[in-house]
């Protein structure tokens, strides 16, 4: 990049093909509005207005002088051609938003992508991206105000009725004792979880977005279903909130359906499903990990990624450190809210993660013992000619291994990041040391 | 000569871009597997005796606490 900037002829500046200018980010928490750009690979990028207008002007039809004039007329202030080149080379090109300069066969580094520490790993697609919008369209009418009001009114009424006319403890005992009921409960809860994810997809479609794949993966140590609703960034705040709350709304629908089935048939499984669906609904509204409540919080305060504010807020609390512009440019109420959130979430999550790492030897030992136990059970089942026992043992062993696998991935990610940080730090120090002395001689 | 309306160096430096993470709504699958084997045996043998009584009682209370 330095070479490009110091070359005799300035490198041409053209927006890369596939980059979409998605307009203003609705309901932004910043004092000045933010804008959304989506790269061809789907990576969404939030930018300030001047950067957005620069990118819009660099459509390949004009040079830097004409582009800067176009930007100046849009923003009502003067942006010089040199200023535009600076923004293009230092802010836009490193993010893969501009074409490579002529003579560059391939970029030296791949365009960066967001890689949060706490994200779904080892994921597998259950429903491909091309099918999910169709599924969403089928269920999108459920967001009409009439069914929404009906479900919101019916659920508490049903709960009150069940509280006085149903025995949850008897239903639980029955389900635990009867293997068939227990299996039915597990099956229905898996379906309910997928229905929850369908709610997000349907909410996204209802707002005009295009949801991506529905899949299953590993979130830290927990298996999880997920729906890719990255396209919701483009939606209005109302559309984003509908997408966020679509899951809990569909969980409420599942709870109402299960409650009605129990009232009609007396099936104990239905009563337990009704309870568990509402427990899940409440759990989903917690804003501390990437559950639905986290996205709701982010959309209410206008910050797309609150976890990205943890580091700058904590650094800003250190003595002698300046407040990062990512924080200082937020509106006052938003800044206070996100700071309180950080002060709550860090003490909640950090000890938990530390405890997980501390318990790693115990978890690995217990996992290995469990796998050996299941191996013995599988051998016994095989010897007895019972294939179901073998399958059950295999499934049990796989489930028992999940926490250890998740922790191994988390440990690898942490080590990889630490190594990358050390390499980058060493490189910066080396560059500083080897900078040419103003006289042209190396410093002593 | 720059005028007051020209965007200056510090303002250019303050222009920012932020990569947004993939937005994946999650539904955690709470699975708890607790393999428990409980064997409860009691034998009372009364053989080849006269006027004798044999009693056997086996009681068991088994609790599993599991945290997903």
Image (spheres, rainbow, N blue to C red):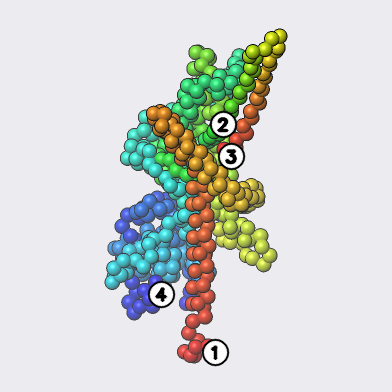
What's the mark number on residue A444?
1
Quadrant where the N terminus of chain A is found in the figure? bottom left
- Can the viewer see residue B60 in this picture? yes
Q: Is residue A95 left or right of residue B53?
A: left
- Residue positioned 55% across, 58% down in the render: A326
Residue A304 in picture, x, y percent from top left: 51, 49
Q: CA distance from mark 2 to mark 1?
A: 72 Å
Return the chain for callout 3: A
Q: Residues at badges 2 and 1 in contact (C-beta under 8 Å)?
A: no
Q: CA distance from mark 4 to mark 1?
A: 26 Å
Q: Residues at badges 3 and 2 in contact (C-beta under 8 Å)?
A: no
Q: Which residue is mark 3?
A: A286
What's the mark number on residue A2?
4
In the image, which is nearer the foreground, mark 3 or mark 2?
Answer: 2
- Residue positioned 58% across, 44% down in the render: A288
Q: Residues at badges 4 and 2 in contact (C-beta under 8 Å)?
A: no
Question: Is disc 3 on the same chain as disc 1?
Answer: yes
Q: CA distance from mark 3 to mark 4?
A: 46 Å
In the image, which is nearer the foreground, mark 1 or mark 3?
Answer: 1
- Residue positioned 42% across, 37% down in the render: A201
- Identify the image quadrant of residue A84: bottom left
């Amino acid at each position: 990049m330095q070479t490009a900037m110091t070359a005799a002829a300035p490198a041409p500046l053209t927006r890369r093909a596939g980059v979409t200018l998605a307009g203003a980010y609705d309901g932004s928490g910043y004092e000045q509005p933010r804008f959304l750009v989506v790269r061809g690979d789907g990576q969404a990028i939030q930018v300030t207005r001047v950067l957005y207008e620069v990118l819009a002007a660099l459509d390949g039809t004009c040079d830097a002088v004409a582009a800067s004039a176009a930007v100046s007329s849009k923003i009502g202030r003067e942006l010089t051609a040199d200023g535009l080149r600076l923004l293009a080379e230092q802010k836009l090109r490193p993010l893969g938003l501009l074409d490579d300069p002529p003579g560059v066969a391939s970029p030296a580094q791949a365009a960066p992508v967001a890689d949060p520490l706490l994200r779904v790993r080892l994921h597998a697609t259950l429903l491909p991206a091309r099918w999910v919008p169709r599924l969403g369209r089928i269920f999108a009418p459920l967001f009409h105000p009439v069914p929404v009001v009906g479900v919101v009114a019916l659920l508490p009424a049903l709960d009150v009725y069940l509280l006085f006319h149903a025995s949850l403890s008897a239903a639980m005992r029955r389900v635990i004792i009867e293997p068939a009921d227990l299996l039915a409960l597990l099956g229905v809860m898996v379906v309910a979880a997928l229905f929850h994810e369908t709610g997000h997809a349907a909410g996204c479609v209802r707002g005009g977005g295009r949801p991506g794949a529905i899949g299953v993966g590993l979130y830290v140590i927990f298996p999880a279903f997920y729906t890719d609703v990255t396209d919701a960034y483009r939606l209005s705040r109302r559309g984003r909130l509908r997408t966020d709350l679509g899951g809990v709304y569909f969980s409420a629908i599942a709870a109402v359906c299960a409650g009605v089935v129990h009232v009609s048939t007396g099936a104990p499984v239905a009563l337990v499903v009704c309870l568990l669906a509402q427990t899940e609904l409440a759990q989903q509204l917690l804003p501390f990990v990437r559950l639905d409540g986290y996205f709701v919080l982010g959309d209410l305060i206008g910050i797309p990624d609150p976890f990205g504010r943890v580091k700058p807020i904590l650094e800003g609390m250190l003595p002698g450190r300046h407040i990062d512009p990512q924080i200082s440019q937020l509106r006052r109420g938003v800044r206070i809210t996100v700071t309180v959130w950080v002060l709550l979430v860090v003490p909640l999550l950090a000890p938990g993660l530390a405890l997980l790492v501390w318990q790693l030897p115990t978890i690995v030992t217990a996992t290995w013992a469990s796998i050996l136990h299941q191996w013995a059970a599988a051998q016994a089942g095989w010897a007895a000619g019972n294939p179901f026992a073998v399958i059950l043992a295999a499934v049990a062993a796989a489930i028992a291994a999940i926490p250890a696998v998740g922790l191994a991935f988390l440990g690898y990610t942490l080590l990889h990041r630490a190594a990358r940080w050390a390499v980058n730090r060493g490189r910066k120090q080396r560059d500083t040391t080897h900078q040419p002395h103003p006289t042209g001689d190396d410093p002593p | 000569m720059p005028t007051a309306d020209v965007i200056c160096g510090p303002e250019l430096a303050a222009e920012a871009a932020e990569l947004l993470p993939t937005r994946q709504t999650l539904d955690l699958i709470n699975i708890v597997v607790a393999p428990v084997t409980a064997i409860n045996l009691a034998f009372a043998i009364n053989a080849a005796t006269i006027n004798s009584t044999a009693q056997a009682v086996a009681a068991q209370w088994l609790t599993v606490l599991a945290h997903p």
